[in-house]
Each structure stands twice: as C-alpha cells, then as structure tokens.
C-alpha cells in the first residue's frame, strides 16, 4: 500500500464517518507508510517528535486506532499493556514469534500452515480475509541473559 492509496482510504473514511479532517493525521500517515516493520505507539511518537515537537502522545494513539479502523494498519495486542502496529500489505500471510521479555518480533512464513488454514476455512465455508499466528515465548538473547 502506498501513500496515495492510503490517503484516499483515510479521506473516504473521514468523510463517511463525519470526522474532522486534520493535517496532523495526514502527516502521521506519511510517516507510518514509510515504516516496513512493526512499531508501537511510543516508537512512532518519538520518531514524530523529532519533526514536530508539538505532537501529543494521545494524538498518536488516537490516530493509530483510526488507521486500524480504516484497514490501513493491523493492531496486535501484546499482553495487557503493549500493542504493536503493522501495515496491511499485499504479501502472503506471515506469522510472528514474539518475545515476552523484550518484545522483539521475528516474522516467518510457513506455507504448510497457510495450506492448513485454507483447508480449515473451506471446511467451515469461511472466507479468509487475513490471518496471523502469534507464538509467544522468550527469544534466544533473553534466554542467555538468565
Ligand atoms: Zn527477548
Ligand atoms: Zn509482521
């Protein structure tokens, strides 16, 4: 998804839901589209703050949730207080290994898993939109620290 198509999605969503359009949202979107990795709200906030010191963390949170509603981003919950975001992109479904200690995320693609999903979906006459498996545990680095 590039900036132009995502800004169109955002504008359409704002119009349909009678929201106020603010220049801040477009500025945040511009930065979000450049990110190819997973990120959390604080990381994005720190990044944005370098360019705009008036930005407020609450605005970043609200805007990210808005992007999730429009379908531009996916939000994953990491335990009770942590969430991370990722762009919805047209690549085959990928999965995550998530470290509960440091929050690091490793992506992997597993064709066998995807074939299995398709089979399950077929059996239930279910149309898959997207899917992600999350495997929680302790990464190699954190294991060695103990
Ligand atoms: Zn770790
Ligand atoms: Zn991912």
Image (tube, rainbow, N blue to C red):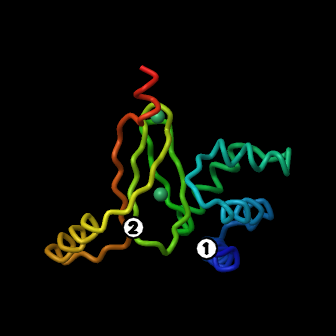
Q: Could you say whether the residue bearing mark 2 is in a helix, strand or loop?
A: loop
Q: Is residue 106 above or below residue 33?
A: above
Q: Could you say whether the residue bearing mark 1 is in a helix, strand or loop?
A: helix
Q: CA distance from mark 1 to mark 2?
A: 25 Å
Could you tell whether 119 is left or right of 97 in the image?
left
Q: Is residue 121 above or below residue 50?
A: below
Labelled disc at residue 57: none
Residue on which the image places disc 2: 93
Residue on which the image places disc 1: 13
Tell me which label, 1 or 2, sits earlier in the chain.
1
Residue at (62% x, 76% y) in the render:
9
Q: Is residue 67 above or below residue 56?
A: below
Q: Is mark 1 within 8 Å of ligand 2?
A: no
Q: Nearer the viewer, residue 135 or 16?
A: 135
Q: Nearer the viewer, residue 144 or 87?
A: 144
Q: Residue furthest top?
A: 146
Residue at (68% x, 50% y) in the render:
60
Q: Nearer the viewer, residue 18 or 54?
A: 54
Give the image quarter of residue 112.
bottom left
Residue at (43% x, 36% y) in the render:
80
Q: Nearer the viewer, residue 25 or 40?
A: 40
Could you tell whether 92 is left or right of 110 in the image?
right
Mark 2, Cα crowd under 10 Å, few <14 / some 14-19 / many 20+, is: some
Q: Position of residue 55 (x, y in %)?
A: 79, 47
Which mark is in front, 1 or 2?
2
Could you tell whether 58 is left or right of 40 in the image?
right
Residue at (50% x, 41% y) in the render:
104
Q: Is mark 2 within 8 Å of ligand 2?
A: no
Give the image quarter of residue 53.
top right
């Amino acid at each position: 998804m590039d900036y132009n198509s995502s800004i169109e999605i955002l504008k359409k969503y704002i119009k349909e839901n009678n929201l106020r359009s603010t220049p801040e949202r477009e500025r945040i979107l511009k930065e979000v589209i450049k990110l190819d990795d997973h990120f959390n709200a604080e990381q994005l906030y720190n990044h944005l703050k370098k360019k705009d010191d008036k930005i407020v963390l609450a605005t970043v949170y609200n805007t990210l949730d808005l992007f999730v509603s429009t379908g531009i981003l996916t939000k994953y919950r990491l335990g009770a207080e942590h969430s991370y975001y990722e762009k919805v992109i047209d690549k085959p479904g990928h999965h995550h290994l998530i470290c509960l200690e440091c929050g690091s995320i490793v992506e992997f693609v597993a064709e066998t898993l995807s074939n299995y999903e398709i089979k399950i979906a077929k059996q239930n006459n279910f149309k898959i939109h997207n899917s992600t498996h999350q495997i929680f545990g302790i990464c190699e680095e954190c294991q060695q620290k103990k």
